[in-house]
Image: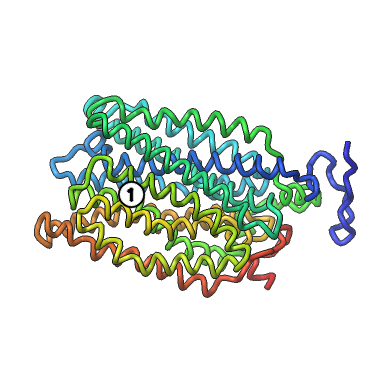
Amino acid sequence: MKHQPTIAAADGGLARNASAGTNRDEVTTGDLYRAAWAASLGSALEYYDFALYNLASALIFGPLFFPSADPAIGLIASFGAYFLGFAIRPVGGIVFGTLGDRYGRKFVLMATILLMGVASTLIGVLPTYASAGIWAPILLVGCRLLQGLGAGAEQAGAAVLMAEYAPAKRRGYFAALPFMGVLLGTVMAAAIYFALVRVEDISQSWLWRVPFLLSVLIIAVAIWIRLKLKESPSFAKLEARHQINDSPLKHLIKHSKPTLLKVIGMRMAENGGSSIYQSLAISYMATATGLKGPIGPIALLLAGVSGAVIIPLTGKLSDRFGRVPVYRAFALYQLLLAYPTWWVLSQGNAAASIAMLCVALAGVWGMFATQGALLPELFGAQHRYAGVAVGREVSAVIAGGVAPLIGASIIAWATAHWGGSEGRVLAWIPLASYVAILSLIGVVTTYYTPETRGRDLDDLRDAADAV
């Protein structure tokens, strides 16, 4: 067995656990890329589900599970169920984030992938309202809640795992790689829906179930890779030094409230913009301008492809110029494009709308990628998983989860008060203002956020306390 060095006297002089694999030198290139794949596939499943549910909520869940004489009411009910999946995510973040800081990143990442995958697969076998009545939406909401519980810690765990595995000088790049899984999941969902909507009206056949049933394939591959994964070096060091905190959530609340607020503020721009452009904008194009069929899936498909270039490049930029300046630049980009984007969407031109959604989502991808290293670097080692999970998921409720619901209500209000179909089109003005406000919150928050590039992730203090 390879000789295991001991921890320096400053660390208490404790002998390192021979089986923990805690030395940075023991993290081979193979380990690093295995961690990247393990994190990416979990992100792929989460955002495959995310994009799938977005598209289904905008295009088919209304008539299948929430039938109503008024399509706008059905849309609001559909997005209401969507919101409930977000509302439960902080609970998942608290539960699994705490477990991740107590029992390890690998353990939790196995649990969350199973929970999300099983819930998504079950949606594919649910009865509809026509056959089960009120039980159909109840069961759909139940599956959505299970999805939300698992998702509440999956992306946080992927970010923490990869940041703790990566070499400090290239942490921005490697920590951004799991977010390629976000694109993979989005592209897969969009491509499948694009193929299905060209065949027939999938809400009138069993074909709408196929994308959800395919979740089981991603689960199988992700579990197989994660079983071979080593624990993250930072957590292994905490174990070896007997520094595991028995109450990471209590420790987090006591020491990290300002840091949590910073995470929530920055995520208002990214998560809010992501939900609005990937879900609400598609339903707006379908209901207000008549751009139905494959337009929405095509837009998400092409946006995902563009993100495959933007995300790793942004990670490298954050390694060179710092996390905060890069994040701020993309938040400003989204702010400046809010009104032009929604004006273009209101014109009802298919090609222009698709192109503009791709351009608008570039801001989301850039902020997304920068978060990979930035959020884990903000928190101390003892409560890092809980900190990232809680911060991400509280913001996911108040920014991402509620955004489509608010947006659908805005469209319904504009339709009623501004004159039918014309008013529905004019809803682009308050919708653009909504995006601008969320983006501005993100921009302002960056001016209160410390730079974290190159930070020692074994440090028990938050970044703000270490400055």
Find residue 18 and report its horizontal and vertical position in percent. 85, 41
Residue drawn at x 52%, y 54% is: 311
Give 391 or 368, whichever is nearer the viewer. Answer: 368
Residue drawn at x 64%, y 59% is: 251
**Which SS class for mark 1?**
helix
Q: Is residue 467 left or right of residue 199?
A: right
Extreme-left residue of the structure: 419
Looking at the picture, does residue 106 appear above or below residue 341?
above
Find residue 153 and report its horizontal and vertical position in percent. 54, 46
Q: Amino acid at mark 1?
A: Ser
Q: Check disc 1 and report the residue beneath it.
A: 279
Residue drawn at x 24%, y 63% is: 343
Looking at the picture, does residue 45 appear above or below residue 125?
below
Tell me the quadrant of the picture where the C terminus can be found: bottom right
Q: Is residue 201 left or right of residue 318?
A: left
Residue drawn at x 56%, y 70% is: 449
* Figure disc tally: 1
Find residue 220 and report its horizontal and vertical position in percent. 55, 28
Q: Is residue 251 left or right of residue 447?
A: right
Q: Is residue 275 left or right of residue 289?
A: right
Extreme-front residue of the structure: 351
Colour convention: rainbow
Find residue 428 and report its horizontal and vertical position in percent. 23, 61
Tell me the quadrant of the picture where the N terminus can be found: top right
Tell me if mark 1 has few (under 14), some (14-19) or many (20+) residues whose alpha carbon lies within 10 angstroms of its own.
many
Give 284 or 130, whichever is nearer the viewer. Answer: 284
